[in-house]
Image (cartoon, helix red, strand yellow):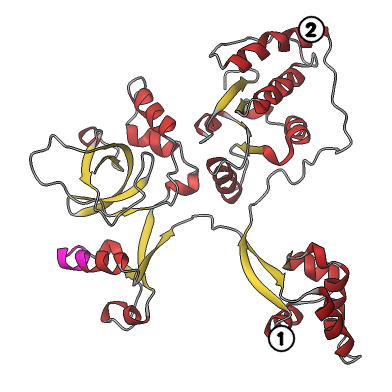
Amino acid sequence: MIAQVIVDIAAKQTDRIFEYHIPDELGGVEIGSRVFVPFGPRKLQGFVVGLSEKSKYKGKLKDLLLVVDEMPPLTPELVKLSADLANHVFSYRITILKAMLPRVMRANYRKILTPVSAKAKKMPLFQGDPVDLSDITDVKQVTFVRKLLRNADAKIEYLVENRAKVKTQNQYLLTEDKAEYVKIYNALRQNAVKQKQLLMDIIENYQKYPKFQDSLEKDAQVNTSTLTSAVKKGWLKKRTVEVYRDPLSGFNGDPKKKAITLNDQQQNALNEITPVINERKAQIFLLEGITGSGKTEVYLHAISKALKQGRNALMLVPEISLTPQMVRQVKARFGEQVAVLHSGLSEGELYDEWRRIRRGEVRVVVGARSAVFAPLTNIGLIVIDEEHESS
C-alpha cells in the first residue's frame, strides 16, 4: 500500500503530493492520518491525503516511518475540502491542513523512544539521556528502532512544546461487597476517625462509586493519605481517568425549562426548513428578522429536527456574537451534546472540545469562523448566524 502525503513545508516546490511505501508492520494508516516521513536528510510531519495500490514512480519509494495519532485527526471530507480550497485561495495546501487542527496540535513534536521490556531497558541505547528520534539518522539505527517497535520492546512518546496535556483525575473503585465494608467498619478502633469516615461514606453511598478523588475528599472529609492507606489495605482500587475540560460548565440551563412554542411566523419558517432536512437535500434558506424576533428559537427547533434524523448540526456565529446568552440557550436545549470552538477558549479547552467532536461524542458544534473546520461528520444542518456581519 502507498500513502500520498502532503509534507510540512510551506513552499512552492513542495506544494504537491509525495508518495511513501507503507510497511506491513505499520498498520492504521488512513486518509487524514498525521504521519512522520523521511524527506531528504530530515524527518517531517505530513498528512495522508490519499491511498493507492500502485505508483507511477519508477524508483524505490521510501518507507513511511510513524503514524502519530490512533484516530486520524482529519476526516476524509476535510482532506477533500483542503484540496478544493487550495485550488481557490492563495495558500499552500499544508497551511490549510494545519489550519484545520487546534493550535496545540500544530506545535513541533519531539519523538522520544522509551524502553518497555526488561530486555530493552538494559540495552546501551537507553543508558543515559532520553533517545530523541530526530537524532537517529543512520539506516542501521533506524532499522533497529523499527524492530524494537515492532516487537513491542520500545514505544514512541510525543513531546510537544507548548502542548496542552490531557487532563486526568484519580478515581477510586470498590473492591468488596457492602457487607464486607460493614464488617471492616465495626472492627476498626474508635480513634481511627478518618478511616471510619471513609468507610461510612462507602457504606452509605455504595451505588455512587467509583468516585473521583476531589468528590470523595469533600463527601467523606478525608485527605490523600487516608485514601492511599485505604488502597494499601485493599479497601479501594485507584486508577487514573482522562477527563475533559468543560468550557460550558458555567452555562448549565434550567432543567425545568419548558419547550417554547413558536409563533405563526417562526412556525412558517420552520415548516419550510423541516422537509428539506427530512429529505436530506442541500438547500439554502435566508431567515430575516429584527433583533428579538426569535430567529434563534427557529435555529434551535431546526437543529432538533436534524438530531431526530440521526444527523448533526453546526452553528457558526461572528466572534462578537458568541455571547453567554447564545451559549446558554444552546446548552440548555441540548446539554452534553454541545461543543464550542472559538478563540476565547484556553488551549486545553480547545483541544478537549475538538477531541470530543472528532470522537463523535457531541452532536452540535457552536463556534466562530474556525469552527467551519470542526471534524464533525454526518451534518444535517449548518446555521450561519448574523451572516451579514463582516467577520
The quarter of the displayed image where residue 382 is located: top right
Q: At numbered mark 2, what does the secondary structure look like: helix, strand or loop? A: helix
* Magenta residue check for 62: no
Tell which of 75 and 372 is nearer to you: 75
Q: Is residue 253 left or right of residue 286?
A: right
**Residue 335 percent coordinates (x, y):** 74, 39
Q: Dot 1, how many residues are within 10 Å of its Cα: few (below 14), some (14-19), or many (20+)?
A: few
The quarter of the displayed image where residue 152 is located: bottom left
Q: Is residue 150 left or right of residue 207?
A: left
Q: Is residue 215 above or below residue 332?
A: below
Marked residue nearer the N-terminal end (1 or 2): 1
Q: Is residue 14 above or below residue 135?
A: above
Residue beneath disc 1 = 233
Kind of residue indicated by mark 1: Lys
Q: Is residue 301 above or below residue 165?
A: above
Residue beneath disc 2 = 265
Cα–Cα span, label 1 and label 2: 67 Å
* Magenta residue check for 140: yes
Q: Is residue 388 visible?
A: no
The quarter of the displayed image where residue 79 is located: top left
Q: Is residue 342 left or right of residue 227?
A: left
Q: What span is colored magenta in the figure?
A: 137-143
Q: Outermost residue, left direction?
A: 58
Q: Mark 2 and mark 1 in contact (Cβ < 8 Å)?
A: no
Between marks 1 and 2 in the image, the one whose residue lies nearer the viewer: 1
